[in-house]
Image (spheres, rainbow, N blue to C red):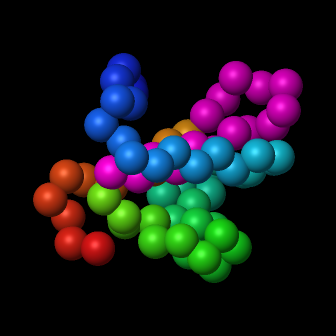
Amino acid sequence: MLNDASGFQKIYLATGYTDLRRGMERLANIIRFRFYLDPYARNTLFLFFASAISSSMSAIVPKRGSIS
């Protein structure tokens, strides 16, 4: 669970419907090929929502110290 987002320099929200059953690798591919961003960028949070009326959400948070 993400309790504190103060350490992130950038936060991206993927609006609209996202199939959260895809898994992290497919969500990373959405970041890379649809948004043309690096899914492993440091200090960056990517949020995906299941639908506009759902409270389901998935986040991709690169590990600290990972190589981008």
> Which residue is found at the position 51% from the left and 66% from the top?
28
Report the side of 50 relative to 31 (left or right). Answer: right
Q: Residue furthest front?
A: 9
x and y percentages locating residue 6 in the rendered image:
34, 30
Label count reads 0
Task: Report whether residue 13 is seen.
Answer: yes
x and y percentages locating residue 54 in the rendered image:
77, 26
x and y percentages locating residue 29 in the rendered image:
57, 72
Q: Which residues are magenta?
A: 43-57
Asked if 13 appears above or below 51 in the picture, the reply is below
Report the side of 56 relative to 65 (left or right). Answer: right
Asked if the magenta segment contains residue 21, the reply would be no
x and y percentages locating residue 49 in the rendered image:
69, 39
Asked if 16 appears above or below 57 in the picture, the reply is below
State the image quarter where residue 33 is shown. bottom right
> Which residue is found at the position 57% from the left and 61% from the top?
27
Q: Residue furthest left?
A: 65
> Which residue is found at the position 37% from the left and 66% from the top?
40
Asked if the magenta segment contains residue 45, the reply would be yes
Q: Nearer the viewer, residue 55 or 64?
A: 64
Task: Report whether residue 25 is seen.
Answer: no
> Which residue is found at the position 21% from the left and 72% from the top?
67
Report the side of 63 relative to 23 (left or right). Answer: left
| Quadrant in which the C terminus is drawn | bottom left
